[in-house]
Amino acid sequence: MSKFIVETSEPLKGKIRTDGAKNAVLPIIAASLMAEGKCIIEDVPDLSDVHTMCELIRILGAEVRFENNRLEICADNIINRELPYEPVKKIRASFLLAAPLLTRFSKVRIQMPGGCPIGIRPIDLHLKGFARMGAEIRQEFGMIELTADKLGGNEIYLDFPSVGATENIIMAAALAEGVTVISNAATEPEITDMSEFLNKMGAQIEGAGTETVRIRGVDRLYAAKHRVIPDRIEAGTFLAAAAITGGDVRIENVIPEHLRAVISKLKEMNFGIEEDDDSVRIYKNDDIKSVDIKTMPYPAFPTDLQPQFMSLMTTMNGTCIINETIFENRFQHVGELSRMGANIKLEGKSAIIKGGNRLTGAEVKATDLRAGAGLIIAALCAEGKSEIGDIYHIERGYCRIEEKLKALGAKIEKLDI
Ligand code: UD1
């Protein structure tokens, strides 16, 4: 078990580079199972979630080589085998293997991924999509069994723009017979990135990144080479860390357009922002003020940055409301932030934050990945020392976060105990 020990830090200063996006590479790894030959994926972050996904496809018989942020995958000889629940339950993205496996085998059994600390996270929209394409679905003993000799294209309306459901349906439709049109699709950049990878493999996907995605099924897909987009959530986390310490940091390997809502909110708070094609600089101005935030599907403010920005708000004068509309249980960090002196009340989907309280270091626990990142950010400006436990959650989505923050002047150490 490891911990982060964080002490009050001076304003962060310098440059930092983000890694490739975790949420893009996980569906891309799944999609690579649909190709004939060896796929090459570059700028892959060295994260435990990526290792888990690789472990899952190795169990299926894929040949996987992961070195120096480069991933080679050959799935020519995969077999139709049930995956053990242990690695499946570690990452919800394991269910993204459903579509590739269904397109390769006419019957697949895959474990239901289960809930997680931030919410129940059902898979009904994924299943609705498969059913609309002609799959028969049986659910028993914690397993989903999907059967379809050949999937057929159809019109599919998503009741909510789910990221994972959009990805699974695009993958299934890529090798289905005929045309599939997804309406009210999720528009997250990671979906566009996965679709670009599939198009390089020979798929015919139009409109990824918009609410209507049109996929013309093809007979076969071939290996491709792809570089993963930068991680906008990692970039947003560093923006929040720089902001809370009143620092001056340039974040490189960023697509500023992917952070439009986040940058707009920071400007509303009166932080200085400079952008160019692939970097964003943040610096402190006078009269910083708190703002209300509502999380919603892209291009609105991302739920994956809600805890980090809540930490930031606790330090600002004034009262603000953070409204979480995506996950029903994504406020577990509130209890931990309260231990550090934050004044936050919860009312249903809203957190009311009375800012300006002095935060003080405390022993706290990361309850999930982004909540853990939020605690690091709070600890950077809290008085005294904080100990953050259960950091395996944080390491699912941030590679060597302590080294990156230290390079900017943060006082953070990883303690292996
Ligand atoms: C992805 C991201 C995650 C991010 C989330 C929302 C990956 C690997 N993970 O998760 O980091 O927090 O998007 O931006 O990309 N829902 C249903 N039925 C379904 C599917 C989803 O009701 O079949 C609901 C969920 O419970 C949740 C909401 O839709 O309330 C959003 O979930 P979804 O967009 O599917 O998130 P994920 O793809 O799981």
Image (tube, rainbow, N blue to C red):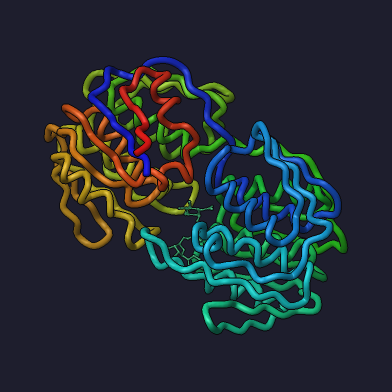
On-image quarter of the N terminus = top left
**Lateral position of residue 363 relative to residue 238, left or right:** left
State whether residue 153 is above or below residue 369: below
On-image quarter of the C terminus = top left
**Lateral position of residue 165 relative to residue 281, left or right:** right
In the figure, residue 309 lies in which quadrant? top left
Residue lying furthest front: 417
Q: Position of residue 143 (x, y in %)?
A: 57, 77
Q: Position of residue 416 (x, y in %)?
A: 37, 36
Residue drawn at 23 percent across, 18 percent down? 286
Instruction: Give the mark count.
Output: 0
State whether residue 101 is above or below residue 241: below
Report whether residue 78 is seen.
yes
In the figure, residue 249 lies in which quadrant? top left
State whether residue 161 is above or below residue 380: below
Residue drawn at 75 percent across, 47 percent down? 73
**Lateral position of residue 291 relative to residue 154, left or right:** left
Q: Position of residue 85 (x, y in %)?
A: 54, 67
**Lateral position of residue 411 relative to residue 50, left or right:** left
Q: Nearer the viewer, residue 174 or 55?
A: 55
Report whether residue 306 is seen.
no
Residue drawn at 28 percent across, 21 percent down? 246
Q: Position of residue 35 (x, y in %)?
A: 81, 54
Residue drawn at 57 percent across, 40 percent down? 21
